Image (cartoon, rainbow, N blue to C red):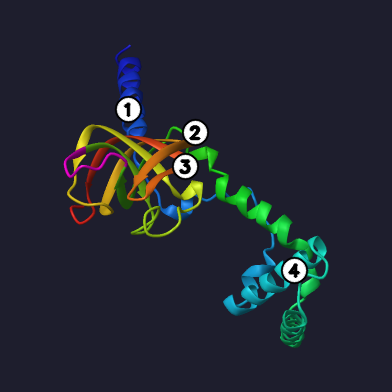
Amino acid sequence: MRKLIFTFLFLTVFTSIFAQEVKVIHWDDLISDEVKFDDPFEKLTEEQIDETSYIARIRMLQERKPGSVNAEILKKVQEKEKKLTAEGVDIEYLIAQRTAIMELRKKKAETVVESLNGLNIRMSGYLLPLDFDGKNAFEFLLVPWVGACIHTPPPPPNQIVYIKFDEGFKTTSRFAPVWVEGTLSTKSLTKELFLADGIDNINMGYSMSAKKIWNYNDK
């Protein structure tokens, strides 16, 4: 009987400790492997991407409004086509795949890692208050780089975590580097972010009920 009680207590304590275990994750861990595809545009230089996009735009304009493209622009297109072909770029294939690749990129950006749902996790990032007034804030966006959603376009939805912290976190600035600990959810959300020139709707793939938030350097 004593052995049975001891075993029960041991398992109870073990289960409790295991349940409280916190998993440290990084931003790459939030990107799902579910959507896999070969993106031919990743092999191009920035200049090659710009030139291919230019050719595609002019061709589309020609189709929609025949005769609207003058000879000078057509000559420029031909020069770009010749240059890209010499560099080994398959222009026709890229233009044909453009729409499909855009859809796959969108799907990859929105797909979350369902196995993370309900886990107690800890991760670092930059805190962007949704109700910033220089005092305590209770709702935030956790983003992977400084300036995201404000000075640069928003990251993909699966690279933004909506944080709700009932205790409130005192911050005097945007993008404070922090550690956040709490229960992660894979439920997608859309929140309003108030900007100097208006309001932007931000899509998030993850949300978290935070238990602790502290400055990044205070490990």
Residue 16: numbered disc:
1
Q: Amino acid at mark 2?
A: Lys
Q: Amino acid at mark 1?
A: Ser
Q: Residue 212 in the image: x percent, y percent?
A: 24, 38
Q: In the drawing, what numbered circle is on residue 187?
A: 2
* Residue 17 visible in the current orientation: yes
Q: Secondary structure at mark 1?
A: helix
Looking at the image, is mark 2 or mark 4 nearer the viewer? 4
Between circles 1 and 2, the one closer to the viewer is 2
Q: State the CA–CA distance, disc 1 to disc 4.
A: 54 Å
- Pointer 3 residue: 204
CA gap, disc 1 to disc 2? Answer: 26 Å
First reached walking from the N terminus: tag 1 or tag 3: 1
Res. 94 mark:
4
Q: CA distance from mark 2 to mark 3?
A: 9 Å
Kindly identify the residue that appears in the image at 32 percent across and 25 percent down: 10
Residue span colored magenta: 130-136
Measuring from the top left, give residue 151's x and y in whole percent: 37, 59
Q: Marks 2 and 4: CB-CB under 8 Å?
A: no
Whole-percent x, y for residue 26 in the image: 41, 53
